Image (tube, rainbow, N blue to C red):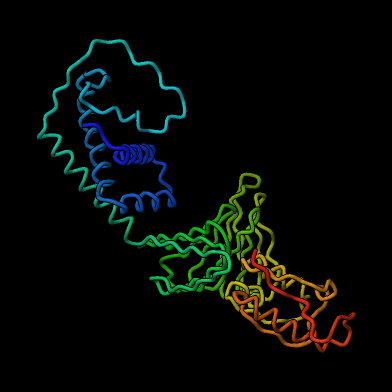
Amino acid sequence: MNPTPEQRAVIRQAVEWHQLVNDGELDPVSRLEFRTWLQASPSHVHEFARICALEVVLQGSLKKGVPRALPGNVINFDSYACITRRPPPPPRMPTVSLRFNTKKIAIAASVVLALIVTLFASLVSTDKVIVTQLGHWDKQLLEDGSVVYAGPRTKLRFHFNGDVRAVRLVRGEALFEVAKEPGRPFIVSTDAGTVQAVGTEFAAADLGDTVVVTVAEGKVVVTATAVRDGVQSMTPVVADQQVVMSPTGASAPVGVDANRELKWIRDWYEYDGERVGDIVAQLNLRNDVQVIVDDPQVARLRLNQPLTFKPSQPEDFVRKVNRWYQDYPQKTGGQAGAKVLHLERS
């Protein structure tokens, strides 16, 4: 019976995953995607196990000298795989009829299925993903007692086991309040390098070409991916210090006010002398609703009174600045009560 288009799609996907597993190309991200695919449908697990079982049978036959030609009653799975290069022509040889021992196939299939179930269970047990969209912040308690704050447009992948607490910062910015477990380090990996801690509070922000690491409490070790003079540098960073990782390595730590630097990730901001335009720029990076400056003078001004607001609520910022500017003595003009900021949907 010919497979349906849906069945053909599952076969193709199973073949591709089988190739990745055989080639040893399942990194932590691919492992999570593989687990998600297996979890999506029992037919995925069944098809993957069937391909593994068929491979066992064919390898056993090949060891006995049977040529690599498949008989007409066996599906050619290569036709379902994504071929990136032209396959070599089939060798010219007489057709050989293979006789499969159905009992051995059943045993092989049951063994492979048991292995798949074990693998599936190990993948499901500890993997976690946090994804935030533009204009949204998230705060979650992890299974080890650590707390993570994720800023807008952030994606994090977690894989905890008995030896390590591994986190992958795929994009965005996140703050970690790490629970102390001396025997199980907490490691955040990025394209630019890794940050390792045991019990501390630090943040990592992926800015595209660079990753900024800021430590609020305790100590971390930053290891850049880049290698200089054959050595991969390891940089200790302590509280109120910041390091920038780039394709060329890690910078020397510089002193910062960490609590102030990390307010954006906590979704809380307290004014302390910044220009209105600088605050607007940060808000617009993190929200789909944009703050528009109607009076150019306002962007250059520094607020002369305390101002607190949540970055996830830019309308609160606009309302407070407009109220403040009504009584601003050096304003250039405009009608009494006129607004200098407004919001627009991007």
Q: Left or right: where does residue 289 sit relative to residue 138?
A: right
Q: Residue furthest left?
A: 103
- The residue at the point 40 percent across, 60 percent down is 159
- Quadrant location of the C terminus in the rendered image: bottom right
Residue 119, position as x, y percentages in the image: 28, 51
Q: Left or right: where does residue 341 sit relative to residue 265?
A: right
- Quadrant location of the N terminus in the rendered image: top left
Using the image, determine if residue 126 lies above or below residue 218. Answer: above
Residue 68, position as x, y percentages in the image: 27, 20
- 78 or 187, nearer to the observer: 78
- The residue at the point 41 percent across, 75 percent down is 145
- 300 or 107, nearer to the observer: 300
Q: Left or right: where does residue 320 sit relative to residue 97?
A: right
- The residue at the point 16 percent across, 43 percent down is 110
Using the image, determine if residue 273 lies above or below residue 220. Answer: below
Residue 336, position as x, y percentages in the image: 83, 86
Residue 248, position as x, y percentages in the image: 67, 50
Q: Residue furthest front?
A: 335
